[in-house]
Image: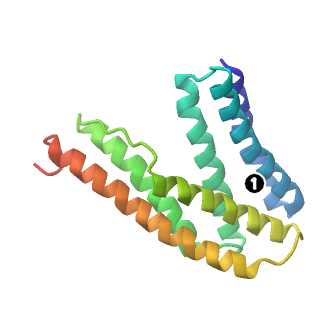
Amino acid sequence: MTLPNFITIARFLMVPLVIMAMINGQMQAAFVIFLLAGLSDGLDGFIARQFNQRSELGAYLDPMADKLLLVSVAIMLGYLGALPLWLVVLVVSRDLMIVGGVLLAGLMENPVEMRPLLVSKINTALQILLIVVVLASLAGAGEFAAQVYWLVVAVAGLTIASAAAYLVIWLRHMAGSGGAGS
């Protein structure tokens, strides 16, 4: 176990903390925990690169921790009415589509490695920014209705674009290897 792996595991443990804070109406605490989780993501990556502490375990744990945090907080914000439910469904559906495609390809003995695309990285960054802005607003740091509106529009568009890009890659892979297109 490397130090970055321990930091990533700590991020997993922050997920129930931020959700419980949101359930209890402690939005300032939720905001701070979410920010700490985000900082921990940057820190574990920095340490892994700078001190040659990359690991196969970390390559799996890090994106899982990120997705668990983002999806959990997005669902909770949708439940609280702070994010449109249609956006939450769109974001979660895209993630499920990607995971389902990878699992299906593996079950069909045609494994596909899905690497993050640029559109997906930008989408994730905007999802994080949207959640930070919404949590900051709920924590009383200001009114950001206009920013939230445009971030919702951008996240929706990029989520659709990202889903389409991954679907095209998956379909080409499956058709080219005697999979789904045969």
Q: Which residue is label 1 attached to? A: 19
Choose between 21 and 56: the one closer to the eye. Answer: 56
Expressed as whole percent of the image width and height from the top left, the position of residue 58 reads 58, 28
In the rendered view of the protein, which quadrant contains the N terminus? Answer: top right
Q: Report the residue at 35% width, 41% height from top.
A: 103
Residue in the picture at 68% in, 66% down:
130
Seen at 75% across and 54% down, the residue is 19
Residue at position x 74%, y 81% in the image: 145
**Does dot 1 land on a helix, a strand or a loop?**
helix
- Residue 107 placement: quadrant: top left
Q: Residue 22 appears at what percent x and percent y?
A: 80, 60
| Farthest-out residue, bottom | 146
Q: How many other residues sit within 10 Å of disc 1, few (<14), some (14-19) or many (≥20)?
A: many
Residue 147 image-quadrant placement: bottom right
- Residue 120 at x, y percent in the picture: 49, 55
Give the residue at the far front of this rendering: 50
Q: Amino acid at mark 1?
A: Ile
The answer to whether residue 113 is seen in the rendering is yes
Looking at the picture, does residue 77 appear above or below residue 73? below
